[in-house]
Amino acid sequence: AQKVTQAQTEISVVEKEDVTLDCVYETRDTTYYLFWYKQPPSGELVFLIRRNSFDEQNEISGRYSWNFQKSTSSFNFTITASQVVDSAVYFCALSLNTGFQKLVFGTGTRLLVSP
Amino acid sequence: ETGVTQTPRHLVMGMTNKKSLKCEQHLGHNAMYWYKQSAKKPLELMFVYNFKEQTENNSVPSRFSPECPNSSHLFLHLHTLQPEDSALYLCASSQGSYRGSGSSYNEQFFGPGTRLTVL
């Protein structure tokens, strides 16, 4: 079975602080995809990144960076110099290579960035 | 309209009512999804339609009935719901997949959701 664990329920930081959101996943498959989505108060999930299981290179996109480590089954997300607009719920998700794109989500981490 | 839209955005209904949620995608996709987001629980996949064919029913109670008349529209018909069905219902769409298509993955785009309250 597949499972995604986001142990941090809520994180509060002050603007300009760096923050890391943890994600640990479980799967027996060798081919899979990992994702991060952002859910602002408006409700819709906004896609941030997709990684496949064969690509362990870390990625940086502006203030966002992702650290994928297969050895520890983790796919952590770091926001550098956080801003109030980063306040949202962030979801990590896993999908197998089934061809029908079933996403398994974690419970999400609520990030509160105060001025 | 662009992206994925959902109507209504908010719905309050009694347990004996019948209502429908609507999702429309303007992205030219062929796969559509219903998810349920309850408080403090992971998003749960409910149904998947791929090229108008239902490919997934994730043990959803029969009081939820999906309908996909074409690749751009997806409905969720509700009847005789329970208070525990109160949740945010999210629709998503993606490019469709063909069985045995290999290692491709098509990103899902989500709508804003319908906040459902069952009294």
Image: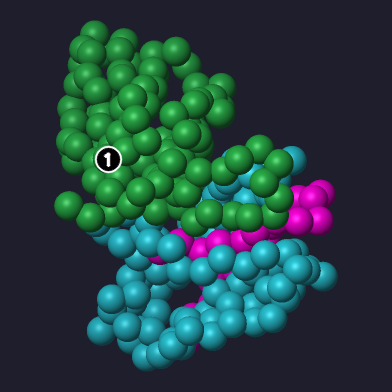
Q: Whole-percent x and y of residue A75?
A: 64, 69
Note whether A92 is above or below B22 in the view shown: below
In-front residue for pair A28/A76: A28
Give the residue drawn at x 81%, y 49%.
A28
Give the residue drawn at x 61%, y 40%.
B98
User: In the picture, which chain is green?
Assistant: B
Tell me which segment is drawn in magenta.
A18-38
Q: Decide whether residue A24 is among the magenta residues.
A: yes
Q: Is residue B113 visible?
A: no
Query: Which amino acid type is marked by label 1?
Result: Glu
Q: Colour of chain A?
A: cyan
In this rendering, would B25 be left or right of A18? left
Q: Main secondary structure of the magenta part?
A: strand
Label 1 crowding class (10 Å Cα cut-off): few <14, some 14-19, many 20+? many
Q: Whole-percent x and y of residue A63?
A: 44, 87
Residue position marked by numbered label 1 in the rendering = B24
Q: Decide whether residue A65 is among the magenta residues.
A: no
Q: Quadrant of the C terminus of chain A?
A: bottom left
In this rendering, would B60 be left or right of B92? right
